[in-house]
Image: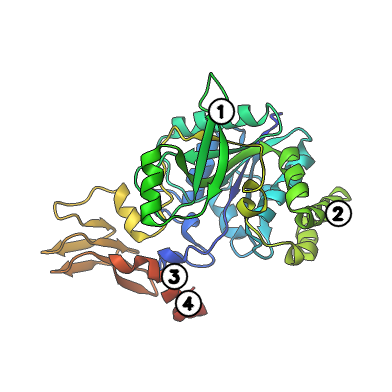
């Protein structure tokens, strides 16, 4: 059996895609871009790299049933619902524990569930190179995205010297937080920075060792979870006992920004994290006035709008510009594109009944 695994992180609320995205069925469980749920597309992309039985999904208890419905070919025992969210370091550590139960020498990629990648072959080639690199030693490998613009919404990776003659593998000098526009422009001009997309590959033992060194409190919790699971404890009960008290910290802060054995591989594929409604327009053909519509829509004397309609409901726009209009069974959003980042704040006012 292959010692390579893929773990897909499928939590989060997807609030910036309200009202289409809800707490129990957020962005990654919807066909925001494409004809299948984002998570299902993520599973499809990796099945050319690892067998289906080596795919794990870490979600939360509220979304687990929906994940099982969307990904029926992933073994149910490998769809794990966190009882509470504890950020990415806990998810990575839990994944390492589960992989080590299957294979002491196992390596795994940890990937987000909600990215848009059209070039599947390029993605698989990059992921395979990530596995090959991680399996050569105690390396923490991250896949970096070559920047196409001076984006201020992403963290960056400062790339160091190349360490492999045959393949594009580089040392990481440091991780940097989301920059202001002037700094982002300097990063882009230097050619030495890539976007941090949160895609990693490592041996399970390597990342456990790093957690023990840089986040010992978290690693102690993982060891307790591992001990109980090894004694045939039920995972729901074990996580219920330990997860609420586990350290809440991102894997970037816990490990990646401190470790000195981090390598990066530039992505040989297209990538978009589709973080808010305006990003959807990049993946659909607009009309002559720049309007993008999914579902039933009539647009007249209007330009630059995004229209998203459920259940055959007709949306008609007349004489408006740069709006986001999203209709669902129980809610309708009308928002200017410039305010898309504020949708998350709006959701907090909407009330639990519509989340």
User: In front of the other: label 4 or label 2?
Assistant: 4
Distance from label 3 to label 4 (Cα)?
7 Å
Q: Which mark is residue 129?
A: 1
The secondary structure type at the circle numbered 3 is helix
Judge whether residue 257 can be spotted in this image: yes
Mark before the other along the chain sequence, 2 or 1: 1
Q: Which residue is mark 3?
A: 344
Q: Earlier in the sequence, mark 4 or mark 2?
A: 2
User: Which callout, 4 or 1, points at the residue further toward the start of the chain?
Assistant: 1
Q: From the image, tell me which residue sits under label 2.
A: 228
How far apart in space, not on screen, are marks 2 and 1 (Cα)? 35 Å
| Real-space Cα separation, disc 1 to disc 3, in angstroms | 37 Å
How packed is label 1: few (under 14 Cα within 10 Å), some, or many (20 or more)?
A: some
Left or right: 93, with 64 as reference point: right
* Residue 226: image location, x then y, percent: 82, 50
Q: Position of residue 209 (x, y in %)?
A: 77, 43
How many residues crowd around disc 3 within 10 Å: few (fewer than 14), some, or many (20 or more)? some
Q: Secondary structure at mark 2?
A: helix
Q: Is residue 140 above or below residue 167?
A: below
Relative to 293, residue 272 above or below: above
The nearer-to-camera label among 2 and 3 is 3
Contact flag, marks 3 and 4 (Cβ < 8 Å): yes
Could you say which is closer to the camera, residue 35 or residue 135?
135
> Residue 348 got which mark?
4
Kind of element beneath mark 1: helix
Between the C-alphas of marks 2 and 3, the distance is 38 Å
């Amino acid at each position: 059996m292959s010692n390579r695994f893929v773990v897909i992180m499928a939590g989060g609320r997807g609030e910036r895609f309200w009202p289409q995205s809800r707490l129990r069925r957020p962005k990654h469980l919807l066909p925001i871009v494409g004809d299948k749920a984002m998570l299902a597309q993520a599973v499809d992309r990796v099945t050319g790299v690892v067998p289906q039985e080596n795919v794990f999904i870490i979600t939360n208890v509220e979304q687990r049933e929906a994940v099982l419905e969307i990904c029926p070919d992933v073994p149910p025992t490998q769809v794990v619902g966190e009882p509470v969210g504890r950020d990415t370091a806990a998810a990575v550590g839990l994944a390492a524990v589960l992989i080590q139960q299957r294979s002491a020498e196992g390596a795994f990629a940890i990937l987000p569930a909600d990215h848009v990648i059209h070039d599947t072959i390029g993605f698989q080639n990059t992921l395979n190179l990530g596995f090959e690199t991680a399996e050569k030693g105690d390396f923490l490998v991250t896949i970096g995205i070559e920047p196409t613009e001076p984006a201020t919404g992403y963290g960056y990776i400062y790339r160091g010297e190349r360490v492999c003659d045959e393949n594009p593998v580089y040392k990481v000098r440091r991780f940097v937080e989301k920059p202001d526009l002037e700094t982002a422009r300097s990063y882009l001009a230097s050619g030495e920075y890539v976007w941090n997309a949160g895609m990693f590959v490592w041996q399970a033992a390597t990342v456990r060792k790093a957690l023990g060194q840089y986040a010992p409190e978290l690693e102690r919790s993982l060891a307790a979870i591992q001990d109980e699971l090894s004694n045939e404890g039920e995972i729901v009960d074990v996580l219920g006992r330990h997860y609420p008290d586990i350290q809440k910290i991102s894997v970037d802060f816990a490990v990646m920004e401190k470790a000195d054995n981090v390598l990066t591989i530039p992505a040989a594929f297209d990538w978009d994290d589709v973080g808010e409604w305006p990003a959807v327009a990049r993946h659909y053909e607009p009309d002559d006035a720049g309007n993008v519509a999914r579902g039933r829509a009539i647009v007249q004397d209007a330009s630059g709008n995004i229209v998203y309609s459920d259940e055959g409901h007709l949306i008609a726009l007349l004489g408006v510009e740069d709006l986001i209009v999203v209709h669902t069974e129980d809610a309708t959003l009308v928002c200017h594109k410039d305010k898309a980042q504020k949708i998350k704040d709006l959701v907090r006012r909407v009330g639990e009944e519509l989340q």
